[in-house]
Image: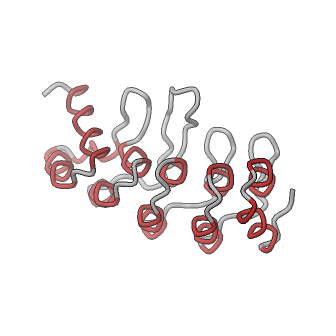
């Protein structure tokens, strides 16, 4: 099978959460665990974005690097980790917990200088994700590429409960 076609099928299986299909493909070619598609997105990040816990588990079990940065060529998607992708996508808590259990580092910045905490503060008023990231060592006052903190993003986006939580944890504008 041609490499591009195999990669397309692999990413389709990840998007659909087809763990058995993923396991078969990754067993046949373990190097695919760290594959990127034509858009520069990692297989792990793709599965995480779509909230597919079983797919994320299969890709991690096959040896995917949990903290690998994608090489996104899509203008509105920064190069990021699977943890960023999970938070920017479906925000599936089980996926986020799994990534953190498997060593995802909540302090790694994406190509915009944003940590997963910035991503969470920007995308949603979801206290559970923010609490989890803070418990796992996220830096509450890390500055993004433009100098903004997660609190500044939460305030800007009107994510009031997240903003209040960040303030309680020492967050500054």
Task: Give percent across and percent down for residue 142.
Answer: 76, 56
Q: As rendered, which of 111 and 63 lies closer to the eye?
A: 111
Task: Give percent across and percent down for residue 120.
Answer: 62, 55
Against 117, residue 98 (above or below) is below
* Residue at 51% in and 26% down: 73
Residue 161 in the figure: left or right of residue 17: right
Residue 56 in the figure: left or right of residue 150: left
* Residue at 22% in and 27% down: 3
- Residue 172 placement: quadrant: bottom right
Task: Give percent across and percent down for residue 68.
Answer: 47, 48
- The image quadrant where one finds the N terminus is top left
Task: Give percent across and percent down for residue 67.
Answer: 49, 53
Residue furthest right in the image: 173
- Residue 116 placement: quadrant: bottom right
Against 128, residue 25 (above or below) is above
- The image quadrant where one finds the C terminus is bottom right
* Residue at 72% in and 56% down: 159
Against 3, residue 156 (above or below) is below
Against 34, residue 56 (above or below) is below
Give the mark count. 0
Q: How is the image coloured?
A: secondary structure
Q: As rendered, which of 123 and 86 lies closer to the eye?
A: 123
* Residue at 59% in and 61% down: 106
């Amino acid at each position: 099978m041609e490499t591009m076609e195999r990669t397309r099928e692999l990413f389709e299986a990840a998007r659909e959460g087809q763990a058995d299909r993923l396991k078969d493909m990754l067993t046949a070619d373990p190097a695919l665990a760290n594959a990127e598609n034509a858009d520069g997105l990692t297989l792990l990040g793709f599965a995480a974005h779509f909230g597919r816990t079983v797919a994320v588990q299969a890709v991690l079990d096959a040896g995917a690097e949990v903290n690998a940065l994608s090489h996104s060529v899509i203008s509105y998607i920064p190069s990021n980790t699977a943890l960023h992708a999970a938070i920017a996508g479906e925000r599936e808590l089980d996926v986020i917990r799994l990534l953190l259990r498997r060593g995802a580092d909540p302090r790694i910045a994406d190509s915009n200088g944003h940590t997963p905490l910035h991503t969470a503060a920007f995308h949603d008023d979801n206290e559970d994700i923010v609490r989890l990231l803070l418990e796992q060592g996220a830096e509450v006052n890390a500055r993004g590429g433009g100098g903004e903190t997660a609190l500044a993003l939460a305030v800007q986006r009107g994510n009031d409960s997240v903003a209040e939580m960040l303030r309680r944890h020492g967050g500054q504008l």
